[in-house]
Image (cartoon, rainbow, N blue to C red):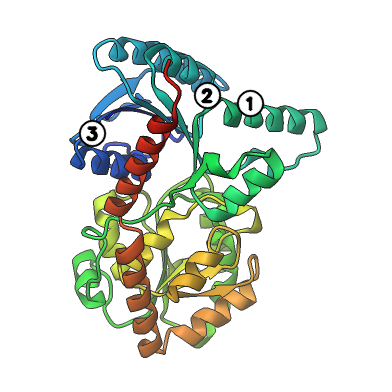
Amino acid sequence: MNIFVFAYWPQNYIDVKEIGLVRVWEISEGLCSLGNKVVVFVPKYRNSYAKVSFKIVEVPFLRIKFCHYMSFYLISFFMSVFYALRLRPDIVYLRQMDTFLSKVLAKCFGAALVLEVHHASCVYKTTNRIKDFISKTKERFNLALCDKIVSLTYELKETLKLLQKVPTSKIAVITSGSNISLFRPIEAEEARNKLGLKPDIYYVGFIGTLYEHQGIEVLVRAAPAILGKFSKAIFLIVGDGPVRGYLDKEVRYLGLSESFIFTGHISYYEMPSFISAMDVCVAPFLKSRGSASPVKIFDYFASGRPVVASDVECSHSLIANSKGGILVPPENPQALSQAIIDLLPDKEKRDTLGKNGREFVVNNYSWDILAKMTVRVCKEVLNNKSPV
């Protein structure tokens, strides 16, 4: 199959040279390894992209506030028409984008349109009822135009069925996953030596983009209680993002600077060493985190590390089914700190949780498995598609 993938993201502060979007990169690599031809349309930032086995088309866009997405959307359409004249697509695959122009592209070239949905706009309420109505109507329009919907979680699938009246048969669930060759169990001492970290103290860590919904502030608020039990513990915060400055100020305000390490942005390929240096990995999501599938939990699992996560929609079934971690009430520093305090000195339990998580991902959620699932969904939609 020839597959055109469209992926937009606005974070031009990250180093896209190696990361880009992990899910898009890994699934596209997997699709290529299965004999498909893949063209990925992404925003053109200053840095070049790492060498991959699929074709990358860098799409210029207007760097004017409120114009980023729309300019990318329009320009990527015209560029994709040019490429489609040379490589006729069978599948047009969108990552959480508007579908109208993509439907035109698919219709013109006889392709099927698949929409990957990360969250449902209809569940987010604001004080502006008109804005909420427009958002919900726009989402319903997008969902109606596509031939198939890929939901990242089963919970999101149920939301789309209930609130947007999408037929069950139209939705396939393909979660996120992990690169189980890159993310694998490494001895903590080896990882710490590599990173220049002290080898004989406890490390509690988080890895990911620093957005408000990640709940790192909750970890900061939980830190004093943990340090009361383990005074030399270090909190390793790996990544960068919009709330980095705020978190720095909170840590200084609470007098915790010596106990926190903020690494800033690191390469995707350096992440396994940081995860392996941690005794406990955390995902303290806020209630507003939504239903998007959290890649970090899969990477924690693949690295054989125990996880303490908020009991919210996106993480509940993962932790419960894997037996690879502990769930705590969201936005509750006391519950978070107590779970970490109980887990840190119990190496046997940490090892058991880590082993369970690793097995869970290897057997169900490697990117190779998810790429095969994506191929099956694409073939199914092509078989069911009416001739143009």
Picture quadrant where residue 331 is located:
bottom right
Residue 105 falls in image quadrant: top left
**Residue toward you, 336 or 42:** 42
Number of callouts:
3
Give the quadrant of residue 59.
top left
Percent x, y for residue 353? 39, 79
Question: Tag on residue 141?
Answer: 1
Sequence-first tag of 1 and 2: 2
Whichever of callouts 3 and 1 sits on the residue coming sooner in the sequence is 3
Mark positioned earlier in the residue sequence (2 or 3): 3
Q: Which residue is mark 2?
A: 99
Element at badge 2?
loop
Q: Are marks 1 and 2 in contact (CB under 8 Å)?
A: yes
* Residue 257 in view (yes/no): yes
Quadrant of the snapshot with the C terminus: top left
142 in relation to 320, above or below: above
Q: What type is the residue that disc 2 sits on?
A: Thr
Q: Amino acid at mark 1?
A: Phe
On screen, residue 385 above or below 278: above
In percent of width and height, residue 63 lies at 46, 20
How far, Cα to Cα, is label 3 from label 1? 30 Å
Label 1 Cα neighbours within 10 Å, binned few <14 / some 14-19 / many ≥20: some
Q: Which residue is mark 3?
A: 36
Secondary structure at badge 1 equals: helix
Question: What residue is at 41 percent from the left and 54 percent from the top?
Answer: 295
